[in-house]
Image (cartoon, rainbow, N blue to C red):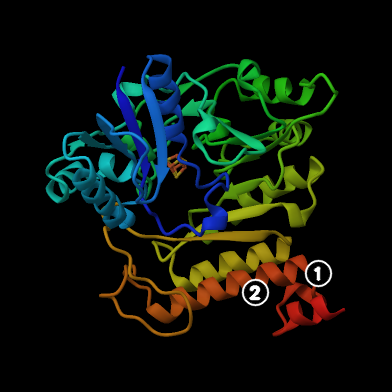
Amino acid sequence: MGKILLVEPDFPIASKSKNHAHFLPIGLLKIGTYHKQNGDCVKLVRGLKHCVFKPDRILITSLFTYWSKYVHEAAEFYHKAYPKARVEIGGIYASLMPEHCKKNSPFAYVYQGLYRRGVAEKVVPDYSLLPEDLDYQIIHTSRGCTRRCTFCGTWKIEPEFKCVDSIKELIGKRRLVFYDNNLLANPKIDRILREISEYRFENRYKLSCESQSGFDLRLLTPELARLLKAARFVNPRVAWDGSYKDRARIKKAIGYLKDAGYNHTDIFVFMIYNCTPSYKEMRKKLDACRRWGVRVIDCRYRPLNYIDDGYKPGRKPQGKNDYYIHKGWEDWQVRRFRRCVREQNIAILLDLPNRRYIPGCERRKVAV
Ligand code: SF4
């Protein structure tokens, strides 16, 4: 029987968000189940802390490449604390930049892709490794993605698209959070959505669902929109990564969701900014969302091999040496775009005239 320590480095995630569905170290929780099933003793630590046992193996996860320094801090800390243990690093950064990872933690073994070619993929994550009970569970109906977007690392880490045709046996909680990269690409998604909409617990409780990634608008149909609504997916998001020219298709996809019964304030559009579409074009995309009354989730682009992000939010200017500023963009545009997104989202939520932000409106609303 081995002693395995699973480590989530001290990533800059606010402690109140650690158990948020978007930040759960789900890969480690699955590896935890796999090793427990094989008779190993497993513990999970989040951050830099000593463990109750002396591990034989230390498995460290990694996330974005620009958070790589936290991974090496953790590797260094645990290597020093348990010099006899074998240190292994896996996850997104390790898969995308294995040489960089090895160079910075030469004592560690570096994994690329899924742990041991996906042995832990078929097991249910071991939520008991977490200090608190969760009111939701993570589900994957697929791994990888059928598309090959240049700015995305998914298909590089998981080149093969694999999916299941049912999730019934996996359901244990009332709230399901889907971690699929492209949920609608699963050819059996209609069957899975029907399964969810018909599912009842013994006490007749129904399920509620959320997809961590945006829905691929090229795959969204009126029928799928209806099935998503019937399966009680909340806050549907469509991804709009391309140019303003795609607006007719986005509008159509949003129309399907509205026709299926979603209110416009429930719908979100994912957008990557500080990337190929210029600032001017991004503002036009943002304005289209204002007209449609849907809110925007913005994501600042950094190249996949970017290892240190020094961006500091706020109004204080920064230069190209501080963080990644895409060709054709400037620091003030990056900041202003972010601010405009937030202000517009407030205006939509508060149903302000023409959905245009009025400075201080949120404070007045609270006072009322
Ligand atoms: S559709 Fe999404 S997950 Fe798939 S390659 Fe493009 S960005 Fe990545």
Name the one closer to the observer, 51 or 307: 51
Q: On the rendered image, what quadrant is the C terminus found in? A: bottom right
**In the depicted structure, whether residue 254 falls above or below residue 275:** above
x and y percent of residue 169 in the render?
63, 15
Image region (quadrant) for ligand 1? top left
Name the one closer to the observer, 234 or 332: 234
Task: Specify the amino acid type for callout 2.
Answer: Glu
Secondary structure under tag 2 reads helix
Name the one closer to the observer, 343 or 19: 19
Name the one closer to the observer, 201 or 331: 201
Task: Specify the amino acid type for callout 1.
Answer: Asp
Residue found at the very far front of the displayed protein: 52
Q: Residue at x 39, y 62 (%)?
A: 275
Q: Residue at x 41, y 37 (%)?
A: 44
**In the depicted structure, whether residue 74 falls above or below residue 175:** below
Label 2 CA crowd tier, 10 Å (few <14, some 14–19, many 20+): some
Disc 1 target residue: 351
Quadrant of the rendered image containing residue 328: bottom left
Left or right of residue 80: residue 143: right
